Amino acid sequence: MSMVRVAVFAVIAVAVGGAAYVYRDEVAQRLGVGAAASAAEKGSTSPAAMAQPQGRRGRANPAGAVPVVVTSVEPKSLPIIIEAVGTVQSISSVQLKSRLDSQIMKVNVEEGALVKEGDLLFELDARTLKAQLSQVEAQIRKDQAQLEQAKRDTVRAGDLLTKGAGTVVARDTNFTTQKAAEAQLEADEAMRQNILTQISYSEIRAPVSGRISSIPYKAGTTLRVGDNTATAVLATINQVDPIFVSFAMPQVFLTDLRAAMAKGGVKVNAVIDDAHKQSGVIGFIENTVDPNTGTVTAKRIANANEGLWPGQFVKVEIVLGIEPDALSVPAAAVQLGTQGPYVFVIKDGNTAEVRPIVLKRTQYGEAVIGSGLKAGESVVIDGQLRLVNGANVVVRPPDAPKPAPTQDEAPKPAPPRG
């Protein structure tokens, strides 16, 4: 009996399904969804509708017109900006090492101090060298006296030879003695200069202006020239003003960058945070293109306030020029589909149309349009998630920003639990 009942129910279900399929158009028309579904189906086959994601094509909106916020596309002057990530680098980074086997006598600088070129930083023991200098200077005075005597002897030998009382051999011998004394004097003066140079090494001065690092060695430490380890560095000075910011920029912009540099200095901004930005100009372009990341460029930036620090990562903005009549829309208006970026354009005041666009760049919350839009058209900036191609819309005003709560309205802390 149960099998017969199941068979009857199955026959009834097949009959109802068949009738619904045969009269589907009439049923849809009476329910009022046929026109919307047909329009959505037709719109989904157009190239504009193909720009939408697959899941959104052909959906009807049985709830009625979709409320949206729109803005007008207007030409305006906008800077042409390329964004990159850069690393702050010191133009000069000098490691200080001793050039003498000596001992530190005095440290004249604090760790992390700002030093100027020529400042005396370290004093080494130079007493032995100064003693050698005194010895060589005494030898120089002896050489000078001997040279003067050799010159007098040469003159006497020449006078005796002219009077017939001397010989040519005596004259030549005295002349040779004079030349030997001159050579000895020159050698001792060179020795004196060598010792003076070594004495100058006992005073370690700042070769550049900048910030000095930590100083691991203090007064009394013995230094060796042969120590080539990393710990042999007395300190490191990094030049901080001006400073370099190195960044990698896609090679597709290389032609535009070189053209802009040919017209004058290309401005660049190092964005430290939302409230701090430092500007400069591009100093040079690397002479090769990195096949992996693009061309590596560098810039020189004034850094008197030391807002940039060596090793810091910053956002870089390269300003290639000004585009006088750029068409732009808020970046929130641009949607991404399988065929690329697109926007919803309002046609006839109440119909949304999918419009594929070519996006040049996005900067400061604005999307600069290369093609696909015209000045004066209205695009949707809020409410796109409920739209499909051909959907009916109703334009509403943008939401007013909520005022900040006053002191009376601010939430009060909960009282402590007893």
Image (cartoon, helix red, strand yellow):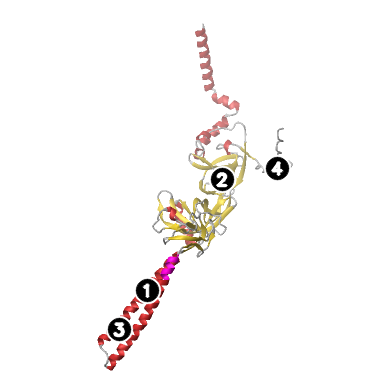
User: Label 4 vs label 3: CA separation?
Assistant: 106 Å
Q: Can you identify the residue that label 1 sits on?
A: 188
Q: Position of residue 179 (x, y in %)?
A: 32, 80
User: Label 1 vs label 4: CA separation?
Assistant: 86 Å
Above or below, 226 against 413 in this view is below
Look at the numbered discs 1 and 3 and tell me whether their residues touch, using CB distance below 8 Å.
no
Look at the numbered discs 4 and 2 and tell me whether their residues touch, using CB distance below 8 Å.
no
Q: Can you identify the residue that label 4 sits on?
A: 405
User: Label 4 vs label 2: CA separation?
Assistant: 29 Å
Q: Can you identify the residue that label 2 sits on?
A: 331
Above or below, 281 against 183 in this view is above
Mark closer to the chain start, 1 or 3: 3
Q: Please check the rendered image and state whether residue 132 is part of the magenta-colored stretch, yes or no.
A: yes
Mark closer to the chain start, 4 or 3: 3
Q: Identify which residue is drawn at 62% across, 33% down.
A: 64
User: Label 2 vs label 3: CA separation?
Assistant: 97 Å
SS under mark 1? helix
Give the magenta part as a residue range. Answer: 126-133
